[in-house]
Amino acid sequence: MIDRRLFLGLTAGASLAALTGCGSSDAGPGGAAGEPRRGGRLRAAFAGGGAKEVLDPHLANLFVEAARSKALYDKLADLGDDAAPVPRLAERWEPSADLTRWRITLRKAVFHDGKPVRPQDVLASYARIMDPKRAFRAKASLSLIDLANSRAVDDRTVEFALTRPFAEFPNALASFSAYIIPESTEDFTKPVGSGPFRFGTFTPGRSTLLTRNAEYWENPPHLDELEFVLANEESARINALLGGQVEYAHDLSPVTARSHEGRGLSIVRAPNSGMQAFAMKVDRPPFDNRDLREAMFLLTDRQQLVDSTLSGAGQVGNDLFGKGFKHYAEDIPQRTRDLDRAKWLVDRAGARGLAVRLDTSTAATGFVEAATVFAEQARAAGLDVQVAVGDKDTYWANSLKNGSLTSFRSGAMPIETHISGRLLSSSTTNTTKWTRPEFDALYDKAVSTTDESARAAAYGEMQRVLHAEGGYLIWGQADWIVGTSAKVGGVRTAPANTLDWARFDTVWLG
Amino acid sequence: MRNYLGRRALLGLAQVLTLAVAVFLLVEALPGDAAVALAGDDPDPGRIERIRASLGLDRPILERLLDWLTALAHGDLGTSVVSGRAVTDIIGAGLGVTATLAGATLVLLVPLAVGLGVLAARRPGSRLDRGLTAVFIGLHAVPEFALAILLVAVFGIGLGWLPPTAVGVDPLLDPVVLLLPLVVLLARPVCSISRLVRASMITANGAEYVRHAHRLGLSGRRVRLAHALPNALAPAATQLARTTDWLLGGVVVVEAVFVLPGVGTVLVDAVAARDLPVVQGLALLFATTTVTVNLMADALSFRLAPRAGVGV
């Protein structure tokens, strides 16, 4: 019942699909919030983690920690509407011709204590994250930086040296929790950042109060105060919203959203937020058999899964990550159910009646439900899929190592990050055990060329291979749902982990 | 009696320590550890190893158990492996909420349950008795979470009389948020205890000593309250002990619905995070509470009805 408190995003930086033509759009059907207005305190309810909750932005792991870090701190870049990085504290970036040196010009910004944000702070922040003895989440994304050879050029310019050519370096700058902190900060009891809000008070497990930073380099917030409060149960978050105890309730279920929509509340849905999948390990039986993987792709009734387990709040997937994101292979036709061919492939693989265990858990909302519905669909094609519900707290580590078929989900991130984290021989979270030298080579080509069209072609090729015979059966993209009171304006429909998700500096109380 | 209590206290201490060690081993036996739980959906094995080393979880299990016991002997419950905060601080924060709620519940529960039980027992089988019985049995059948959700929907949201949750408020500074949880926590114990009081009162009213008291010409009220009731309370005291224990353990479901960060929530979080020192601290707390409360109940029963004897 407490599964949603964990930040289940596999988020090495995140992004948002273009939702409408121009990406994020303002919410608020009633328009009761009116024009932007200064002042007031907005209370936002999130799931929390009790003792686990920390103020150190580099340790951020839960949604509430990510949202709070974003209010207090800045990254050099963040991810925009098509998953492409947009400059934040970095005003612009410029690679050398061979893509191994990147020159970053910093924006004129100050920390909450009045000190300017300097290249030294940037280098020190990254050095802290990359400390070999520590285990920060953003470390893997930054690991290609050669810190010893990186330097401050002047008081607004940093030059990063990389260990290899990397065209997608701005993705690393936008990686999850790669926040810039003042040099040599280790004490976070009173955090000092450069973000739109200053620290006020913190009661672990209950609330965090922040105040407006009038000196913010972008537009200072409309709100005077922002308070994060914790409620682990989704029902409690909606009750608090309905009862006027909070103005913003994060992460609501589709059923809740439907039953309260239009009744004095605004429901904000962000499409393409959560990839919903089953992971087949391609290095072991039975899914080392390509025919059987294709049979799995074809036997899936994606619409039924979306309708039943997401209550319709989502879209069908095409076995590819990052729908709507930059480099997404839109040209690959949508796969549809073909039971006859699936049966034929099952027979050809000699797998008729084969018992296959589907490992799942309540680690993410809807996992068990989706697994149950899917098992039923597989039976229709002659596969005896048996659902095994395991421990939720250790699910991710377990499913990385064990089992041949597991439930999987992912938050938004650039397609490059998804590939480098999960689909290369060197990937540390390669759940499908997809290790192909020729695929690795395609990735290397994509990220080491300066030629945009060659890069696009390489991404296209990688996706064609994955679509044909990969290990991820991606059946849907779930909406991300947030509820606000009618007087809240400026909440944008960005999926979790993106720049505009849980972004409160642009929000106002009408 | 004093001897008996002394022995019971020693036994209780042994029970508490055994339980603490058992809990340690049981949490160790759970799949995964704090490092795996912390890594969550980014289970990079190298990262998990580094987290494990940084939390000191790579040391042998026996060494960690011994460390914990040594620290305990010095009155130190240690620090959370996950947040580094003192276990006493973490538990203390939860205990404030839980103890306030449990205290308030008990203060209302005892007079309410006893009063209703006595009232129902006045004329067994009367319309009042049957009415109360029907209500008690019906209410007792409603689980806490269902009642909680119903009350929130009606009084918190529908009528808007009371705050539906305690989100973001300190319940100790703003006790109005405790009203609905209080009603939920009272509902079932009132039923069970008043039923017990009623039954024992009926038995006592028929007993020879009560009839004798009537024959002596004492007023009915005095006979009921001064003679029958103390005897009738003995079984209720044991049930009250169980209720107290239940309340002090933090009623997780009620805490979750109303967002009260009590010890039940602390426990759920700590187990999910495999935060062993916090789980251990709570195990000690719960075991001590159970032993103490039961000891007190036994002593109280003995005082109320000495004939029960202690059998040792």
Image (spheres, coloured by chain):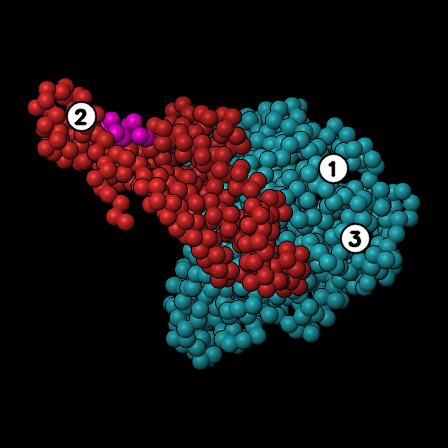
Chain colours: A cyan, B red
Of the residues shown, which amino acid type is indicated by label 1? Val
Instruction: Please tell me whether mark 2 or mark 3 is closer to you in this view.
Output: 2
**Image quadrant containing the N terminus of chain B:** top left
Residue B168, position in %: x, y? Answer: 54, 32
Residue ID for mark 1: A192
Q: Determine the chain carrying the residue at label 1.
A: A
Residue A2, position in %: x, y? Answer: 48, 47
The secondary structure type at the circle numbered 3 is helix
Indicate whether residue B116 is drawn in magenta: yes
Tell whether A3 sits left or right of A208: left
Any part of residue A279 in sight: yes
Q: Determine the chain carrying the residue at label 3.
A: A
The local crowd at label 3, few if under 14, some if 14 to 19, many if 20 or more residues have their Cα within 10 Å, is: some
Name the residue: 75% across, 56% down. Answer: A131
Residue ID for mark 3: A127
Q: Is residue A281 above or below residue A360?
A: below
Instruction: Please name whichever residue, A414 or B261, is drawn nearer the observer in this view of the structure.
Output: B261
Of the residues shown, which amino acid type is indicated by label 3? Ala
Residue A102, position in %: x, y? Answer: 84, 54
Residue ID for mark 2: B224
Q: Determine the chain carrying the residue at label 2.
A: B
The span picked out in magenta is B109-117
Name the residue: 48% across, 60% down. Answer: B25
The secondary structure type at the circle numbered 1 is loop
Tell whether A335 sits left or right of A190: left
Instruction: Please name whichever residue, B161 or A319, is drawn nearer the observer in this view of the structure.
Output: B161
Residue B55, position in %: x, y? Answer: 64, 55
Of the residues shown, which amino acid type is indicated by label 2? Arg
